[in-house]
Amino acid sequence: MQGWNFYVPTITQAMRGKEALRTAGIRSFVGRNTDMKAGRGCSYAITVPNFGEKAERILLEKHIDITRKETGQ
Amino acid sequence: MYYWDNAATTWPKPRPVREAMGEALKRYGANPGRGGHKLAYVTSEAVFRARETAANFFGLSTPDQVVFTLNCTMSMNMVIKGILFGGGRVVISDLEHNAVLRPLHALSPYRPIYDMAQVDMKDPEKTVENFKRVITSQTKLIICNHASNVWGVIQPIREIGALARERGIPFAVDAAQSAGVLPIDMEKDNIDFLCVAGHKGLYGPMGTGMLLTSGRYPLSTLIEGGTGSHSLDPNQPDTLPDRLESGTPNTSGICGLKAGMEWVSRRGEATVYRHEMNIIRYLYHSLVKTPGIRLYTPFPKEGRYAPVLSFTVDGSPSEKTAALLNESGVAVRAGLHCAPLAHQKMGTENTGTVRLAPSAFTGMDEAEKIVKIIRQTVQKSLQR
């Protein structure tokens, strides 16, 4: 896996997170969570290729409910 | 046709609204918040942008707390039944619409569960005092319409909201007639639940509404189902907006509503309000001195009244007057306007009233024509 994945419960939070990162100059992508069990069914991931730690800080500041994260290479 | 029924729904809709809806049908064809393919994300983003627009419009810090509904009535039902799930009493104003009265009646048909605060038509401070008087330790919710759909009187929601907040009681505002016409800031106005019609002052399409929540009070759900999230859990998710939005949304309607809010913002809410109030004041001045016409409210001062004006013709039921006006090409709403409490307050429950409601598109020249037609109609009515 490249970059960081932040799992969030709703598409709205995923979009809001992506928007917050964009405003901070961090590129990200929204996708479906592929691990059904981890997300208690369907959920979303915000994937950040770079600046993962900074991205996490921004998401938490914006009250994005990160249910799980994966820190990649 | 002269369309003066804008308090029921505004018409015509602005071109950007019509175009946004067509564009949505063409470009946002997938189900938002469901699939993982590109079209689903593009559509999800369009819905998200509409949430953002609504949050900014009404002073909410996060779009998560914007819930799309079918109309203001649905939003009111979600609040009333979502808060009173475990019982309790409600304080309402004596001008509430059936969107409030009927859900309350449905919860307890034989023993009213509401206490009514009188709205003072001239003095908002007295209205606040009247609310204060009827709040008890049993009060679980306070509901007040922002502007009466019959009489236009504006309620002091900020002060009533402050009362509610002091006492730790959730405060819901029925903004069916005021959203897009009067300024509303959920935080400053101390509102916990804002129930909005998308198709009136916001110029969106019919079949759109919103429930905006402060997030301070969780709601039990009226409807449960698929949300595209937490699907392994048989319980409805707690996270907003999913908790209150099950099933496929009205994407093109939501896009139209977004365009409507943007249109109102560009034009300026205050500009639209002043324009419509100029028309209402002209109508008031003209009709108050017309023999055979009865007006019920004081002169509609700016800031105290919303742009609707109700009248009756002596000896004529309101529906008959409306039918005569219809023959002259004038579309107005007569009867009780689904607000029996408001009519009982003013003694018009047996005749109803004829309601005139202009929009941003109504010109003063049209108002002048309407006055002439109404005067001719009164003459005909009195002669019959």
Image (cartoon, rainbow, N blue to C red):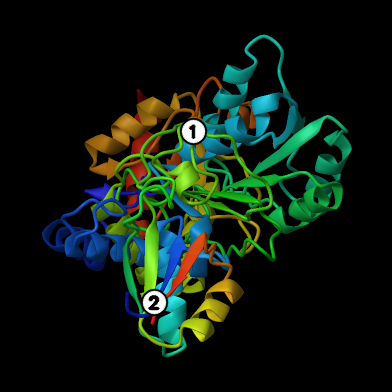
Which sits in the foreground, B122 or B54?
A: B54
Residue B170 lies, with reference to residue B83, above or below; the image says below
Residue B353's label in the rendered image is: 1
The answer to whether one can see residue B248 in this image is yes
The quarter of the displayed image where residue B266 is located: bottom left
Numbered circle sitting on residue B62: none
Residue at which label 2 appears: B266
Residue sitting farthest toward the bottom? A25
Q: Residue furthest top?
A: B110
The image shows residue B172 at horizontal and vertical percentages of 64, 45
Dot 2 or dot 1, earlier in sequence? 2
| Chain that bears disc 2 | B
Mark 1, secondary structure of its residue = loop
- Looking at the rendered structure, the kind of residue marked 2 is Arg
Residue occupying the point 30% across, 30% down = B323
In the rendered image, the vertical position of residue B312 relative to residue B57, given as above or below: above
Callout 1: residue from which chain?
Answer: B
In the drawing, does residue B254 fall left or right of residue B140? left
In the current view of this chain or complex, which residue is farthest to the left?
B26
Left or right: B267 in relation to B212:
left
Mark 2 to mark 1 CA distance (whole Å): 34 Å
Near-viewer residue (B292 or B29): B29
Q: Residues within 10 Å of mark 1 (few under 14, many from 20)?
A: many
Establish whether labels 2 and 1 are both on one chain: yes
Q: Residues within 10 Å of mark 2 (few under 14, many from 20)?
A: few
The label nearer to you, 2 versus 1, is 2
Picture coordinates of residue B48, whole percent (x, y): 37, 63
Inspect this view and state whether residue B275 appears.
no
**Hey, what amino acid is under mark 1?**
Thr
The residue positioned 21% from the left and 48% from the top of the image is B1
Percent of width and height locating residue B336: 49, 28
